[in-house]
Amino acid sequence: MLGTILHDADLSTSLIYGASVWDLNTNQGTKQDNLIITRPGEPEITVDNIKVAQFIYLLLDNKEIRDIIDSITSKAVLILGRFSDERKPVLDALREALRRFGYLPMVFDFEGPTSKDLTETIMTLAGLSSFVIADITSPRSVPLELQATIPNYMTPLVPILQEGKESFTMFADLQHKYDWVLDVVVYDSPANLIAKFETVVITPAFEKRREMTLRKAKRLTTRHINDYD
């Protein structure tokens, strides 16, 4: 199915195992409920979106892909900032430092105003990241993205700020409200930031990620009504 037009089509409960799907054209009238992604005779697994059906089946059927995703989430680091020509050396230094420590840098450079789609992309990348580094030096677009991302993902965020520059006023509120936002790292030069990169960025981010993982794994705490007799 290549670029197939499915406007108002009813695919509900279809058996789609083996379907090859690319660039489908759907609308609000397209029904995709309970699509069966497993072979006939196997226990049924259903999804509600044909575009993601192939991906879900690959996750179930292919250990290598699961391992790749696990590797991404343990090694990927999202870098957010507005890296003008003046600040490009900071970006390059961060990239190289992350690579040197075995991480996979993913850079989102805010060159202009961001759309809703871009915000969702950033949120997705943040959710896949081991941690996020956000350059909050004289930001423009970054505040909007951080306000959308930080509350939704318990992904450690390391904010960096060039000495003598200003951040945005709302950042302190985010830092106080969400404890996976680490202390702001104030640096005087890219060289000095990279020289102490492991101590001031990687180790605190790693420890916070471990803390968040343990927190997510905690058992539900309960109170029984009869305890208040």
Image (spheres, helix red, strand yellow):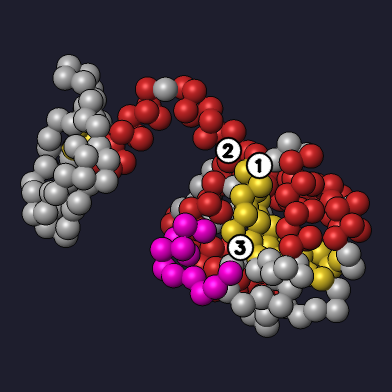
Of badges 3 and 2, the one in the foreground is 3
* 77 horizontally vs 121: left or right: right
Q: Are marks 1 and 2 in contact (CB under 8 Å)?
A: yes
Query: How far, Cα to Cα, is label 3 from label 1?
Result: 16 Å
Q: Compared to 40, does 3 lie above or below?
A: below
Label 1 crowd bin: few (<14), some (14–19), many (20+), radius 10 Å? many
Residue at 59% x, 59% y is: 108
Q: Are marks 3 and 1 in contact (CB under 8 Å)?
A: no
At which x and y percent is residue 56? 35, 34
Q: Compared to 227, does 183 lie above or below?
A: below
Secondary structure at numbered mark 3 = strand
Residue at 54% x, 63% y is: 149
Q: Which residue is mark 1?
A: 104
Q: Which residue ends up furthest to the bottom in the rendered image? A: 169
Q: Which residue is mark 3?
A: 109
Q: Which amino acid lies under the numbered mark 2 shown in the image of this protein?
A: Ile
Q: Which amino acid lies under the numbered mark 1 shown in the image of this protein?
A: Leu
Residue 72: mark? 2
First of labels 3, 2 by sequence position: 2
Q: Compared to 153, does 48 lie above or below?
A: above
Query: How far, Cα to Cα, is label 1 from label 2?
Result: 8 Å
Label 3 crowd bin: few (<14), some (14–19), many (20+), radius 10 Å? some
At which x and y percent is residue 126? 56, 54
Q: Which amino acid lies under the numbered mark 3 shown in the image of this protein?
A: Asp
At which x and y percent is residue 1? 19, 37
Label 2 crowd bin: few (<14), some (14–19), many (20+), radius 10 Å? some
- State the residue in front, 13 or 167: 167
Query: How far, Cα to Cα, is label 3 from label 2?
Result: 20 Å
Magenta residues span 111-122
